[in-house]
Amino acid sequence: MDPVVNGDDRTALAAQVRNDIGREAGGIVDAVLEGGPTTLPAEQRSHRVALREHKIKVPHHGGYEHFERDAVGVVDGVPLVFRWSGRTRIAE
C-alpha cells in the first residue's frame, strides 16, 4: 500500500496523531472536588481530567456546580484538588 495518497504522506500524519494521543494520555490525572453542596454524591467528586484543565462543571439538581483548580501544583500520586467556586442554573 502506498503511504502517499494524492500528495499527502499518510505515514507522517499517522505518526503525528499517535504522538498527539500519547501526549494527551500522559496528561490525564486524578482530581477530587472539594466544597459545594453536601447533596453532591461522593462518586461525582472523583474525576480524571487533562492536566491543562483549570475548571470542572458538574450537572447537579437543575444546574451546574463549578469547581476551580487549587493553586497547589501537581504532586506525583496525589490527586489535583478543585474547589467549589459557585453554581449556575441550566437555562430553560
Image (tube, rainbow, N blue to C red):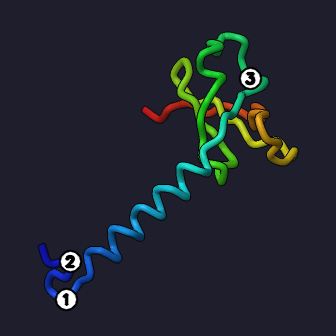
| Label 1 sits on residue | 7
Upstream in sequence: badge 2 or badge 3: 2
Q: CA distance from mark 1 to mark 3?
A: 54 Å
Q: Which mark is residue 36?
A: 3
Q: Position of residue 1 (x, y in %)?
A: 12, 72
Which residue is painted at 55% across and 27% down in the image? 63
Residue 82 in view in this figure: no
Q: Residue at x 75, y 37 (%)?
A: 80
Asked if disc 1 and disc 2 are in contact, CB closer than 8 Å, the reply is: no
Q: Identify the secondary structure beneath mark 2.
A: loop
Q: The disc labelled 1 sits on which kind of residue?
A: Gly
Looking at the rendered structure, the secondary structure element under dot 1 is loop
The three-letter amino acid code for the residue at tag 3 is: Gly
Q: Is residue 39 above or below residue 11?
A: above
Say which of marks 2 and 3 sits in front: 2
Q: Is residue 20 left or right of residue 45?
A: left
Q: Which residue is mark 2?
A: 3
